[in-house]
Image (spheres, helix red, strand yellow):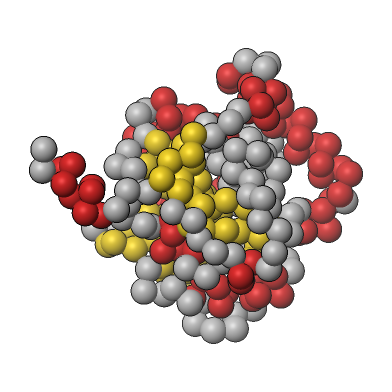
Amino acid sequence: MIRKCLVTIPAYGRNELTHAVLPDVLAESDLVDLLIIDNGGHYETVADEWVERPGRNLGWAGASNLGFRMAFRRGYEFALTLNNDTRLSPGFFAGLLDPRMPADAGIIAPVYNGYWTVQASSYAGPVGQYEPLDYVRRVPMVDGTALMISAPAWEAVGGLDERSFGRFGWGADIDLSMRATAAGFGVYASERSYLDHAGMVSATESVGRQRYLFKAGVGMELALGRLYGWSATRNLRKARPERIPLRTLDAAEDDSRH
């Protein structure tokens, strides 16, 4: 199995956003390979990107799942879906792939400037100046803006639910996190990696911001309510992460000998 991660960027319009994040990804090409899923059919390459054109808009969840399937069929150990309206801190993937991560890790994400408090960082400076912290958070869920799943977790629980969460897929990341937890895998946010998310750029331009927020939010609430009870999202908003210091490699090796 390849000790690398395949990064999939589902792209639908706004090529300049995808082009802007490419250097952040390719700076760690020793750790990751890059795949663009061209949902809109008009992505323009600027380097030697690997581009798949499905011929229709698969949506975020469908494109992410296509990337996951392609990764694990090719023997990658990890696969990550990444929004194109993001920027990444230096050493982003080294942080997510840190060998000191807890052994049960099945889903890993960065901390970020986004909505969910379990994953949100207090850092408010330039993404390029973020200083990594040797902590991870055990969390009930992570946001799908940058979600990495391991091959064993994928084999156990499958991918994102493309049917239950509507056109925009809000909540499918939460559902995947919960299924992974139920299967015995840990879900973590790494403070060694930070993501700056512009948020909802392509979708709001295509359908309008208010319509997008309403339809995506209602779809998430209804789907999570049917699957996990009507207090599910309220409980997630109130959840607090368990902050865990990363063990040194020497300590981890010592533990494994006992």
Q: Is residue 173 visible?
A: no
Image: 185 above or below 226 = below
Identity of the residue furthest to the left in this view = 257
Image: 2 above or below 244 = below
**Residue at position x 50%, y 61% from top?**
132
Snapshot quadrant of residue 162: top right
Q: Is residue 252 visible?
A: yes
Q: Position of residue 67 (x, y in %)?
A: 47, 56
Q: Which of these two is toward me, 122 or 151?
A: 122
Q: Position of residue 79 (x, y in %)?
A: 42, 55
Snapshot quadrant of residue 12: bottom right
Q: Which of these two is toward me, 66 or 25?
A: 25
**Residue at position x 71%, y 58% from top?**
124
Image: 123 above or below 240 = below
**Residue at position x 48%, y 77% from top?**
27
In the figure, is residue 199 to the left or right of 149? Answer: right
Q: Position of residue 138 (x, y in %)?
A: 47, 37
Please state, as top left, top right, bottom left or bottom right, where the N terminus lies in the image. Answer: bottom left
Report how many numbered discs are placed on residues in the image: 0
Q: Position of residue 81 (x, y in %)?
A: 53, 55
**Residue at position x 86%, y 49% from top?**
209
Snapshot quadrant of residue 77: bottom left
Please state, as top left, top right, bottom left or bottom right, where the C terminus lies in the image. Answer: top left
In the figure, is residue 184 to the left or right of 62? Answer: left
Q: Which of these two is toward me, 108 or 119?
A: 119
